[in-house]
Image: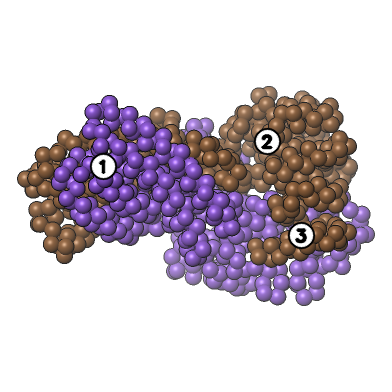
Chain colours: A purple, B brown
Amino acid sequence: MDIRENIFEQWLELIENGELSRLKIELNQDNPANIAEFFDEIPVDMQLLVFRLLTKDNAADTFSFMDSDTQELIINSITDREVRRILYDLSLDDAVDFLSEIPANLVTRVLKNTDEEKRKLINQFLNYPDDSAGSIMTIEFVEFNQNTTVIKAMEQLKKTGVNKETIYSCYVLDERRVLVGIISLRTLILSGDDVHIKDIMENNVIFVKTLDDQEDIANLFKKYGLIALPVVDNEKRLVGIITVDDIVDVIEQENTEDIEKMSALIPSDDQYLKTGVFTLAKNRIAWLLILMISGTISSAIISGYEGVLASSIILSSFFPILMDTGGNAGSQSSTLIIRGMAVGEIGMSDVFKVIWKEIRVGLLAGSILGLVNFVRLVLLRTPLNVNITVSLSLIVAVVVAKSIGCLLPMAAKKLKFDPAIMAGPLITTIVDATSLIIFFNLAKAFVL
Amino acid sequence: MDIRENIFEQWLELIENGELSRLKIELNQDNPANIAEFFDEIPVDMQLLVFRLLTKDNAADTFSFMDSDTQELIINSITDREVRRILYDLSLDDAVDFLSEIPANLVTRVLKNTDEEKRKLINQFLNYPDDSAGSIMTIEFVEFNQNTTVIKAMEQLKKTGVNKETIYSCYVLDERRVLVGIISLRTLILSGDDVHIKDIMENNVIFVKTLDDQEDIANLFKKYGLIALPVVDNEKRLVGIITVDDIVDVIEQENTEDIEKMSALIPSDDQYLKTGVFTLAKNRIAWLLILMISGTISSAIISGYEGVLASSIILSSFFPILMDTGGNAGSQSSTLIIRGMAVGEIGMSDVFKVIWKEIRVGLLAGSILGLVNFVRLVLLRTPLNVNITVSLSLIVAVVVAKSIGCLLPMAAKKLKFDPAIMAGPLITTIVDATSLIIFFNLAKAFVL
């Protein structure tokens, strides 16, 4: 990190001193991902100048790593000829990513500067729904006819392979372009020249369809340790491939989404620092409102037991400990279950095993908490009957919280909701009400 | 998923009916990851029988996909000769993974059945700390001397490449085994036969050291879209490579760890269903205790304002709404900031931008919540002075919660703690106390 910043400082100095030819050499020796990062540091009015220092090869690569704001600025400032060149070098999935983020008038200008074949493809790709296989696939793959020989395949590879995003897995098609097999470059190299592809290819191909969900696809990559995965249409004709580097992004995105849902946020793909105050507030207010309104139930419970409270006002001072402990105990369980289901460790058939486990964990953890609390309240000289009420409530509340915490995410899944919404905040609200009822009823028995 | 279960059903029937030769054919046509999954369904006393149906190639691959319990059971039951054969076929990183999970006496038996060279390597690998580059790297890589030509390199590849985990990136070393460059199989294929490797290799190599942290390494993969990454020792000599499929696991593991920390759990790599009740309780009790004890502060605050409460018992019925809303608002902010820092979108230099943003979001969201609450309490005919107290408290509490929620994770990072511990539960406890103080002081002004 610090080394990077030092290099950026030096480059910025080169810009200030007008030593652009030295900057050009240094820039083009570095990695496009780093160059793209550098653009965040350059004053806006210098970005175009610096971009034009990049070699043809580096320009498109660097462009693909930039955030959409910088991309927009560059495209806005360069000539049609430059637009054409960048679009020509950009791989299709990067082009589609970029076009789906910029304003419509710019899209029109860019598409005008694209050859017809690519324009048709781009339009087709832009139409795939978000989060579908189609939206993350690319067409830069290598294909062979099943009747080709190894030596012809290698020739074909040398002729056409340069622009392909990955040539390590090659796809074997029949005459109707139906995917019939897959062959790794490794097998190709290690096989005799005159062998037919169909005799050495792997027949048992794992593939997905264009509308399949990206989360399921990420799970396939994880399960089989894949580097690329073919995408087919309804007739099993090959239309694209998905590569593992895009899947890494999908995994991060899906994790962020889950984490946000678990914290009562409406998930968003936008970067925090680039999101406006209104959008941020909008993504938060819905759940805050729902949870506040549901909190009315707890209020009603407390009001309902006003008589109990009136006779011992001290009881209300234990609300925070009781509610927070219950909430925390419940969200611990729901988190483990939600995560376990997300990574495929826990299935619906495990429901009884899970509940039985949580009840025992709840009893154990609850008893320890109850005991510590008992000692604490003895030291604080709290009246014994109040102490017993609070400590017993804690034990029962923890057991109940653990049970609710594991049951609700599984129930949500059964009802085809996302289990992640049954996390901390909602569990807390439900557990609050339950804990208070337990507490007041024990109080009636011991304190009144 | 359902198709899989159907196939497993059929296979189980084949076992029951003793049609093992048919099972053998079907099994060996499937993917090792699927075969390994099938072992979870087989009765324990039949597992060895089924394992012996696998071809030599499939046996080691399937073994590497099994969970450690099944691996242990298999190793316990097979002959020394079979152990030797599996170990020979297993890639080094899979062997090390497996050995680090099984009991010591079994490790001894396995190592006794390994040739000396591999045994030395395994021992060396077992000594790398958890979560370090060394612990996830493998030695199955292809290396060339920098003075080799393309045609010689390809010959070398054909001779030795078969057992290598990945041959798509090849590493170029000088005489002292120092890493000087990297060359993709793609470049190799597309270059003339007599060109020297050092003239076409990429000099600007991204590499890591054996003790580097796996989370930082995962970030490198994400930033540069890598498929493999070389690992060097302190003299920059190549000792291994890390491949992207292992990084996918690292990313999931780090995400699980963050999510668990954010829910007041002590992170654990163990699978939920395979973890005992005592361990589960142990991983949860520490934070529950800490948070319960800190809850004492809230109790003390309430006790301190007993006078206020005594004059209007109804006030205590608003504790849940106030505390939960504050807690939720705070954990929304802390989640966004923690996640933003984890994926590198938010840095320490953004602290003022973040606070200013959160204060405005807090004012906006808080005002809406306060307004809705005001209307709600008007409808419920709550006395106006109590209504004003509660609604105003909500607004102030949300703004304070948002500020604390964004500040504490950044403070934790500054102090070199993991920001993830500053999530929901701890924020809630801190926000509770603050909200109560605000509430009671407003109550003093409006209600008394």
Residue of label 1: A446
Residue A138 screen position, x and y as percent: 64, 62
Q: Does B278 sit above or below residue A89? A: above
Residue A264 appears in which quarter of the rendering?
bottom left
Res B12 label: 3
Q: CA distance from mark 1 to mark 2?
A: 51 Å
Res B101 label: 2
Which residue does the image show at 44% across and 69% down from the upper left?
Answer: A105
Taking depth in this image into account, of B440 and B193 the one nearest to the observer is: B440
CB-based contact (under 8 Å), mark 1 and mark 2: no
Q: CA distance from mark 3 to mark 2?
A: 28 Å
Residue A219 screen position, x and y as percent: 62, 55
Task: Kindly identify which chain the residue marked by label 3 belongs to.
Answer: B
- Residue type indicated by callout 1: Phe
Res A222 label: none
State whether discs 3 and 2 lie on one chain.
yes
Task: Kindly identify which chain the residue marked by label 1 belongs to.
Answer: A
